[in-house]
Image: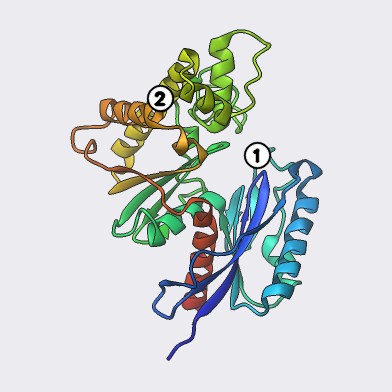
Amino acid sequence: MASDMHILAFDLGGTKIASGMVTFAADGTLAGGAPQITSVPTNAAEGGPAVLQRLVDLASSQLAELGAVDAIGVGSAGVVDSAQGMIVSSTDFIPGWTGQRLADALHKVQTAPVTVVNDVVAHGLGETHYGAGVGYSRVLSVGVGTGIGGALIVDGQPVFGAHDVAGHIGHVMHPLGRGVPCSCGTACGHIEPVASGTGLATLYAMRCGNATTTIANGRDVCELAEAGEPLAISVLTEAGRALGEALGGAANLIDPDVIVISGSVTNAGAVWWEALRAGFEDSALQRTRTIPLVEGVLGGNAPLIGAAAAARQQLHNHH
């Protein structure tokens, strides 16, 4: 009987680098429960080479503790060339991240195969194969956290597009974002800078109009809304509705079977979800209006499980 496959997975984002061992049974199902997650701060401001060294150091300590693995899977921020295992472009979230060669650096730690995919793609793969997207052939996975990311997974495989940017739902136009600088550099009106977690705080400050407000992030806005503060409730409603409208437009363009929504902002409560669904229904065509909007179920494990799934797939392709 074929033995279990052990894959060391990493989720490298702007805030932290998380790692855990993901074990697959021979039939591809998850074995051994949820991964035990170890994480270190990314310290993104130190720049690309320093961040890469932190990844390598974490891998070394994990391998020393966990022993030999069959492969390593990495979900990383930035646009990834998976064939080369490197970052081909990136926002300034991690200065100097573009050009970093993750697979080469990790190969120096151990010889098992290394697979690198974008972190949002990893998240989408996790939810598609082992989470809320199971049983659907076309999944639009949307992550609403610090930023807004997305991935299109068709028949279990990510669709990368001609320039490796397919699924970038955060960079879809919406009037609410006009004039607000986006992480990509434009201020023409992308949805991310007004509907992400960061965007909720930005929008609150814009609507508040007073510079002394101490809103640091989306969580602050959500807590104020829960306490019944009218401005916070209206901001959640406005941002949720705008994102729903953008998702409706995406549904009309892509026509997926399901839209899986994950990330910290999905915990914003009923006000946000109701606004999101209302915006989606107004924007979606009659036939796409029936597409279910479902909440992701894997949480922070999704990118680790997805990165491991990509590495497992790569191993199978080579055998």
Residue 230, how many percent across, how many down? 46, 13
From the viewer's perspective, tell me whether residue 44 is left or right of residue 310.
right
Q: Residue at x 69, y 61 (%)?
A: 102
Label 1, residues with CA under 10 Å away: few <14, some 14-19, many ≥20 = some
Instruction: Report the quarter where the N terminus lies.
Output: bottom left
- The residue that mark 2 highlights is 242
Closer-to-camera residue (197/169):
197
Q: Name the residue under label 1.
A: 91
Mark 2: amino acid = Ala
On the image, the x and y values in percent for residue 255 come to 28, 43
Point 64% across, 77% down: residue: 112
Type of the residue with mark 1: Thr
Q: Residue visible at 78% across and 45% down?
A: 47
Up/down of 108 relative to 153, above or below = below
User: Which image quadrant for residue 57?
Assistant: bottom right
Residue lying furthest left in this view? Answer: 286
Gap between marks 1 and 2 measured at Cα: 24 Å
State the residue in front, 173 or 266: 266
Instruction: Indicate the secondary structure of the residue bearing disc 2.
Output: helix
Image height check: is 267 above or below 131? above
Residue under the image location 63 percent in, 8 percent down: 210
Q: Which residue lies furthest to the front in this view?
A: 227
> Can you give x and y, in whole percent of width and height, for residue 14 in the image?
66, 44
Query: Badge 2: few (under 14), some or many (20 or more) residues near its Cα, within 10 Å?
Result: many
